[in-house]
Image (cartoon, rainbow, N blue to C red):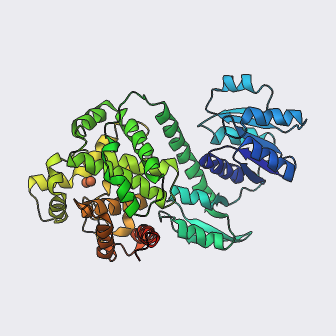
Amino acid sequence: MNYILVVDDEEDIRDIYEMVLRRAFPLDVVLAASGNEALKILEERGKPQLIISDLRMPDGDGLFLRQSLLDKNYEIPFIICSTDPVHVLKRKFPGIHGYVEKPKIVGPIVELVDSVVSRYEVPPSYVPVRISFLLRLGTVHFDLYMKISESKYVKMINADEVFVQSDAERFYGKGLKHLYVLAEDADHYLTSIEKNLSALSDEEKADSSTMAVISLESIESVERLSRSLGWKEGVVEAAKNTVNLAIKVASTEPNILKLFKYKLNDAHSKYSQHVGLLALLNCGFCHQLGWISDSAQMKMGLAAIMHDITVDESVYENIELWNEAAYNSTDKSPEVLKYRNHPAEAVNLLLGIKNVPSDVDQIILQHHELKDGRGFPRGLVSSRISPYATLFIIVEDLINFLGDSHDFDVTIDLFIRHRDERYNSGNFKKVFEVLKENVAKSRAKDGRY
Ligand SMILES: [Fe+2]
Ligand SMILES: [Fe+2]
């Protein structure tokens, strides 16, 4: 009886509910992905104090769940939460406890639950967050703690460190499902996530007539490359979807759309190939790292299609030479100075796009930084480079390294050997390890090692 039941087919949304509810109420929160799963939980655990349900779900939607409860004569306060407007929800669900219109859920949910369940008298200092959720986020901007006892928490992961599968397994191995964050960090996070959710739902509404200007189909090498990198099936497909969505979001700004059309009109140009490949590999690597939340991939996709938007096509004829010239801080020739400034120029253009998720500007600004502080424009040391940017930098380095090579297996193996030392610490190391593991697994499967 002492629990709140949350029913939603989207994992990210369930995890956000859990965080919101556990922050405010001293009750267990149980999650279900469908109406049928919810009914099973009801049978096993008895009636919850409250049900929060999505409307559209496969395997038993919100209407089905509500009707099943009425048929069983269960009187349980019921809150429906959907992207449909409230007046539509009121018609579909007369007489229930409350209606919430997505994506603005955090505030309204707490208020509605508040009238059924009493809040903590003394709010907790730490809030539990599901480990699977942290894994999908890939990186969090606050410290993560492990609960030792009711009053004792120990810091396990620092803010801005990447969170990968091996981290998750370490905690699962201890029988844990949650880590903890400081309550004020949870509040900050919930405010920011709500902004990202709004951005995502606006994207869906974005004019679908805006054309996808990069012809992803033309990048034939991607499928083959993904096999050499040891990716699972379906990863490329998922990455393509995200990249297309990112292009759509960026194209809502007319100036950017114009630039895309001008710069990416030839799908076979070096520039188009670079940007397209980078966008796909970035999103694919997110998958491989277990960062499968829409927002993480959207950030990487957007950063990829925008990062070099002001760079001249001719630069791509010899990108490595340009990079070396720009790393050399004594080179003050006007064309090198301009090239050194392209990350900042891209960020300026980004400001014109509505609802860009946080972090994208940082990824773009840092995409030419190097682990040893020789990079540009800022010459940051590795601890100051954001986790997403770390992934971006390694992927772009790999693409430049591959160059015109056709034997991907050999070149990727060479890349791993050459770069082992460069990427042997901090966030770089974690990302690079995943790349190495993937490749090793794929080679073992092919029976070559
Ligand atoms: Fe680039
Ligand atoms: Fe660049």
Tell me where residue 352 appears, x and y as whole percent.
34, 36
Residue extending furthest right?
A: 73
- How many tags in the picture? 0
Query: In the drawing, does residue 241 fall left or right of residue 171?
Result: left
Indicate whether 307 appears above or below 207: below
Q: Is residue 91 above or below residue 274?
A: above
Q: Is residue 149 left or right of residue 208?
A: right
Q: For the view shown, which residue lies furthest in the front direction?
A: 447
Residue 159 vs residue 366: left or right?
Answer: right
Q: Is residue 343 visible?
A: yes
Residue 396 figure quarter? bottom left
User: At which x and y percent is residue 12?
Assistant: 59, 49
Residue depicted at 45% across the width and 56% down the height: 286
In this rendering, position of residue 266 left or right of residue 277: left
**Quadrant of image for the C terminus:** bottom left
Residue 267 percent coordinates (x, y) = 25, 42
| Res. 361 visible in picture | no
Nearer-the-camera pick, 63 or 113 = 63
Q: Residue furthest left?
A: 333
Q: Residue at x 32, y 57 (%)?
A: 366
Which of the pair 263/355 is nearer the observer? 263
Residue drawn at (60%, 37%), measured in percent from left and top? 104
Picture coordinates of residue 341 (x, y %)? 21, 52
Q: Quadrant of residue 112?
A: top right
Q: Along the line of sight, which residue is nearer the eye, 1 or 314?
A: 314
- Above or below — where is 34 with respect to 144? above
